Image: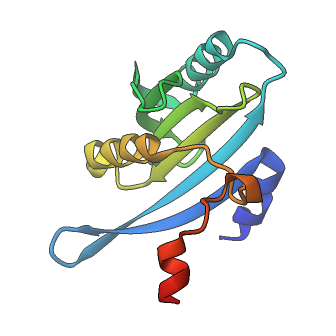
Amino acid sequence: MDGLTQLAGHRVVHTALGLHPDDPTGVCTSLFSLTIRPTGEVDLNPILARTALAIAESSLWTSSLRRPVELPSALPCYLIAGTMSLPGTGQQLFQARVATAHADGRHILVLDLTSAAIHQADGYTDIIEAIAHTVSFTDPAPSRADSPGTSRVLEVLQ
């Protein structure tokens, strides 16, 4: 938990802890994070493919799968998932990562879901892919011109 504050230095903008049922009396934990990486590139397709490849080819991975994901936004997206071996500990973690383009064309989003519950790998892979399908890009504070007009019926009823 103490290390979570250091994630901001790695461009992590959001983290969440998950508690998931495991067998009748157990609980698995997971860490979700969202990272935004500037690219400096105009065409995100090649940089996104290189990012996904670099993730998949990390020396920490002991096994992995990688595949493209079709998102409703039609932005390019890759899923990388597998087990990682932590150096010097003998412990393994499961990690599912999604790398996708930001709608502004200047950033890449990386969504991570990590857990020591490697026996839940398929479920965690499904979760991160479902989260990727919910990513949308909207202005959190739309301008007054974008807000809907008033309704004469509503004005009368108020």
Q: Is 152 placed left or right of 134 in the picture? A: right
Q: Residue at x 55, y 49 (%)?
A: 89
Residue 91 position in % (x across, y down) = 47, 49
Residue 67 vertical placement versus 154 (above, below): above
Q: Locate the N terminus by quadrant.
A: bottom right
Q: Is residue 72 left or right of residue 20?
A: right
Q: Position of residue 90 (x, y in %)?
A: 48, 45
Position of 109 relative to 106 (above/below): below
Identity of the residue drawn at 57% across and 17% down:
53
Quadrant in the picture for residue 83: top left
Residue nearest the viewer, comparing 49 with 147: 147
Colour pattern: rainbow
Of the pair 142 and 33, the residue shown nearer to us: 142
Residue ID at (71%, 41%): 36
When asked about the image quadrant of residue 110, the answer is top right
Task: Decide if residue 95 is on the left or right side of residue 50.
Answer: left
View extreme (bottom): residue: 158
Does any portion of residue 69 appear in the rendered image? yes
Report which quarter residue 152 is drawn in.
Answer: bottom right
Would you place residue 145 above or below residue 130 in this image? below
Q: x%, y% of residue 69?
A: 40, 25
63 or 95, which lies in front?
Answer: 95
**Residue 90 appears in the picture as rendered:** no
Residue in view at x 58 percent, y 26 percent = 55
Give the percent coordinates (x, y) of residue 40.
Answer: 84, 21
Number of marks drawn? 0
Horizontal side of 92 relative to 152 (left or right) equals left
